[in-house]
Image (cartoon, rainbow, N blue to C red):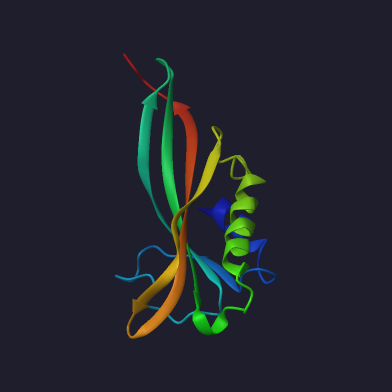
Amino acid sequence: MNAILADLQTLVPSVLKSAFADGMSKVNPLDRIWPGFPSAVVLPPVVSGNEFEDTAHNTMEYTWYIMVVTTAANLPSDPTYLASLEDQIINVFNMDATLQGTSNAAVYPTLVDAPGPVSSNSVTYVAFVISLKARVVVPAGVQ
């Protein structure tokens, strides 16, 4: 997670107002006081794959989710703004294909949820989700 946050921090403040991790301290990650918009919140990963490569190596795949949140009031009039924001965030991970060496079998960023309205506590946000599939080759003990 540190490498993901470090990569996202390279976009603060020029592209994002903030980037931080959420350990699921809230039932709904939107229920918080936001430091500014757009913001990116990194959610805890899930193990999405586990493949034995041979008797000595195993490839684990962790899927991380980054939720990017803004409000309609904070959107510029440029109709390409959200697409550009998506591209800039994905490009950060394209330029760091191993998450600073922590994902030695590469990382694959993809857009999971297209930008759209999301409501929470009577506030409507505009949000999208990017997933990072980080693959790591680890020692295995196949007998």
Q: Is residue 16 visible?
A: yes
The quadrant in which residue 6 appears is bottom right
Residue drawn at the location 60% of the way across and 60% of the way down: 8
Q: Is residue 30 visible?
A: no
Judge left or right: residue 101 versus residue 1. Answer: right
* Image coords of residue 29 (percent x, y): 38, 70
Q: Is residue 45 left or right of residue 36?
A: left
Q: Is 34 rendered above or below residue 14?
A: below
The residue lying furthest to the right in this view is: 14
Q: Nearer the viewer, residue 72 or 137?
A: 72
Give percent across and percent down for residue 135: 48, 36
User: How many numbered discs, if any?
Assistant: 0
Name the residue located 64 percent from the left edge and 51 percent from the top edge: 91
Q: Residue furthest front?
A: 79
Image quadrant holding the C terminus, namely: top left
Q: Relative to 114, does residue 118 appear above or below in the rendering?
A: below
Q: Relative to residue 2, is residue 24 drawn left or right? A: left
Q: Is residue 142 positioned above or below 123 on the image?
A: above
Question: Residue 56: where, in percent of width, then height?
Answer: 43, 18
Taking depth in this image into account, of 112 and 33 the one nearest to the observer is: 112
Q: Residue at the spot x=46%, y=73% of the render?
A: 126
- Residue at image coords 58%, 51%: 3
Q: Position of residue 78 (x, y in %)?
A: 64, 74
